[in-house]
Image (tube, rainbow, N blue to C red):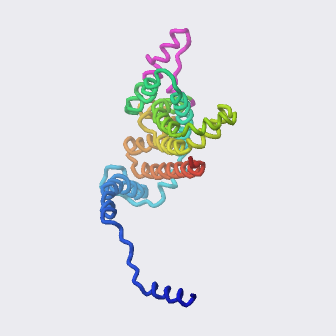
Amino acid sequence: MSELVRKSQQSISRQKVKPIRKPKRMRSLWWMYLPALLVVTVFILYPFINGIRVSFTDWNGFSQTKNWVGVEQYVRMFQDPTTGLVVKNTLLYGIGSTLLQNAIGLLYALLLNQSIRFKAITRTIVYLPVIISPLVMGYIWYFFFAYQNGALNDALMLFGFNPINALGNPDLNPWIIVFVNTYQFVGIAMIIYLAGLQSISKDYYEAAVIDGASAFQKFKNITLPLLMPAITINMVLNIIGGLKLFDVILALTGGGPGNASQSMSTFMYSLYFDRQDAGYAATQGVLMAFIILILSLIALVYFKRKEVDA
């Protein structure tokens, strides 16, 4: 028997094994990726690589010549006290907005997942600010918080209180920016969480009721673990959006007073267009891209590990 098996194996090894060829339709699908790859290369990859190249020059943004200065701009960046301030503000906008958007968005989703009246109207009202331009949203809230003729100060004076310069207070205006950004985009978090909640089978909750689980135990042991994919999506999207915040800051405070509310995006804008210092602006852009990449990857890996199979 062993001799027969050995001869069979030799016979099989001598046979020419034909490679498995992918169906023609599958190979043709790869061509469908080309337009997307072209767009990413032209509008994202090339500008990013060019920005890194510019960060090693002293280009003013307008001249035809770019003088190579090596790492001089990076040394300048880490010695500049404004860098620490704008990085701190950027992290506040990114992490602060992310935490608030997810907490409030999840509460809205849990509420709207119940059988309540006016559910569709409430969902529409919460989501409505998302469709407004961030710049327009910033100006809307500017006229609410403005010192002169602002709605907030008009209401305070109506009740006998002194007006407050909320947008001119460097300790307060970054939190106002976080609030406005959260208010505008909490609807996206709500919709994603609502979709995640509706995908959870009711069988889990019925079994938990039979076992005598409380509402908190059902949320902790069923809802939260099975909602983790939605949490991952929201966390990564909110972190990226918050860290590159620009329009709302420009409309509300313009980065002021001084540089008190500047984010890295608005600081780059000021460096390029106001100070004509494109090389240094590109250096700040490289740092911002690095921060966004690191924080978003940390969030993605951390929350991916928390996901469980339904």
Give percent across and percent down for residue 86.
52, 42
Image quarter hosting the N terminus? bottom right
Residue at (48% x, 88% y) in the render: 10
Q: Nearer the viewer, residue 206 or 81?
A: 206
Counting every numbered tag in the picture gives 0
Give percent across and percent down for residue 302.
59, 50
* Camera sees residue 195: yes
Q: Residue furthest front?
A: 1
Residue at (39% x, 83% y) in the render: 16
Residue at (33% x, 54% y) in the render: 36
* Camera sees residue 85: no
Residue 45 vertical position relative to residue 201 in the rendered view, above or below = below
Q: Residue furthest right?
A: 212
Question: Viewed as shown, does residue 302 lie left or right of 73?
Answer: right
Q: Quadrant of residue 15?
A: bottom left
Q: Quadrant of residue 46?
A: bottom left
Residue 36: in magenta span? no
In the image, the segment drawn in magenta is 143-171
Q: Nearer the viewer, residue 120 or 298?
A: 120
Give percent across and percent down for residue 119.
47, 24
Question: Viewed as shown, does residue 140 lie left or right of 83?
Answer: left
Give percent across and percent down for residue 113.
52, 30
Q: Nearer the viewer, residue 36 or 47?
A: 36
Main SS type for the magenta part? loop
